[in-house]
Image (tube, rainbow, N blue to C red):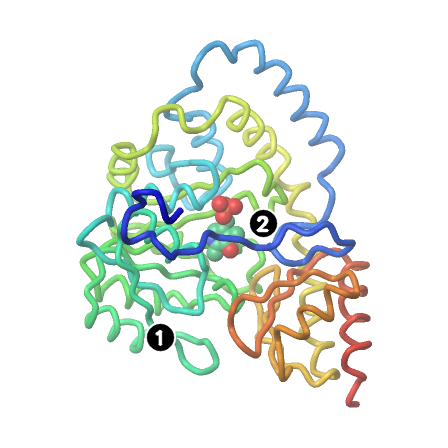
Amino acid sequence: MTGLPVRPDLRGATPYGAPQLDVAVRLNTNENSHPLPAELVAAIAAAVGTAAAGLNRYPDREAVALRTDLAGYLGHGLRVEQLWAANGSNEVIQQLLQAFGGPGRSALGFTPTYSMHPIISAGTGTAFVDGRREADFALTAAHAADQIRRHEPDVLFLCSPNNPTGTALGLDVIAAAYDATGGMVIVDEAYAEFARSGTPSALTLLPGRPRLVVTRTMSKAFGMAGLRLGYLAGDPAVVDAVRLVRLPYHLSTLTQVSARVALTHAPALLETVAAVKAQRDRIVVALPAYGLTPVPSDANFVLFGGMDDSTRMWHELLERGVLIRDVGLPGWLRVTVGTEPETSAFLSAVSELRPPTR
Ligand SMILES: *Cc1c(COP(=O)(O)O)cnc(C)c1O
């Protein structure tokens, strides 16, 4: 790129790049490993076949039918005007930063957190500020509010359950963070469906908080990462603001149709969530016997530490056919929770590397 007139603020930056390797057990990008129900696959194929005849026309620019279905799925009395959808929640976040961030503005996130928040900030010319968490990765209401008042960000990212640490935020933290800023507050709930019971969604905080936005995705619990469908719920004015920056017809006819079919199969799709949570809890219980320390998780992954050299352990697991994630936190690794056999393969590779201590 050195010969190109690339924007100065992008020079030397690295693109998002989780390895896409062809190994037997792929547990590095928090996908849902369970196969999609055969009836759903057939229903999508049929609906796409019918919709293909209309591909000479642009799709519904406002995706009204899909947004209506998404409002129905989320519940909480949400109306279609409060929902917006795009190609993955990453695109939703990009549109939010285009509308509310940008040159001369800043976004605050509490690291370690989702690596795309700083990357999308950089892409939209928004300065990203690294906030701090406690040593155990927790974030208290007082600590969050204090940092928000200090930095006065235009956009605040709260990731709950947080990737890569796995834990959800209490609503008290989100409410305190909202009160501490005059900017937009984005709660990234990509993993909400996996939260342990009794963990309420930030959706319950939307009434009376017009600067609060909750983002969700069909990539994780729904098991449809390949579909590229993310969405937000917020005040109707937020949706109007995002419309100013979205590209016209950004959501293809085929995406809209497939997502609507998938939503009619939501109960069957979400059946795998219980199975994933059971394997997650199995990993959390099993790892201490190998001298490893898992962080409690409300998501479909587990962050664990306790190894001397996390990069070496990542390579040693890969040599055994198990691909997990080196999230760039020295001394920690993140494993996505897959099927029961994948969990067994991961744990057996771990036990080869680290003979049980008890
Ligand atoms: C995986 C993930 C997303 C999902 O991105 P999509 O673009 O919807 O696939 C969003 N936020 C977090 C924190 C994630 O881990």
Tell me where residue 142 appears, x and y as whole percent: 29, 77
Residue drawn at (60%, 33%) of the image: 262
Q: Amino acid at mark 2?
A: Lys
Tell me where residue 254 appears, x and y as whole percent: 55, 23
| Disc number placed over residue 132 in the picture, else none | 1
> Which is nearer the eye, 224 or 211?
224
| Disc number placed over residue 294 in the picture, else none | none
- Crowdedness near tag 1: few (<14), some (14–19) or many (≥20) residues, C-alpha within 10 Å: some
Within 8 Å of ligand 1, the CB of disc 1? no
Q: Amino acid at mark 1?
A: Arg
Q: Which residue is mark 2?
A: 220
Quarter location, residue 314: bottom right
Tell me where residue 218 appears, x and y as whole percent: 55, 43
Q: Residue furthest bottom?
A: 358
Tell me where residue 47 appears, x and y as whole percent: 62, 20
Image height of 233 relative to 187, above or below: above
Residue drawn at (39%, 24%) of the image: 249
Quarter location, residue 58: top left
**Secondary structure under the numbered disc 2 in the rendered image:** loop
Residue 327 horizontal side relative to residue 100, left or right = right
- Crowdedness near tag 2: few (<14), some (14–19) or many (≥20) residues, C-alpha within 10 Å: many
> Which is nearer the eye, 78 or 100?
100
Q: CA distance from mark 2 to mark 1?
A: 26 Å
Residue 262 horizontal side relative to residue 33, left or right = left
Residue 154 horizontal side relative to residue 175, left or right = left
Residue 347 horizontal side relative to residue 232, left or right = right
Image height of 34 relative to 181, above or below: above
Residue 1 in sight from this viewpoint: yes
The disc, 2 or 1, on the residue closer to the chain's N-terminal end is 1
Residue 190 in sight from this viewpoint: no
Tally the numbered discs.
Answer: 2
Q: Are marks 2 and 1 in contact (CB under 8 Å)?
A: no
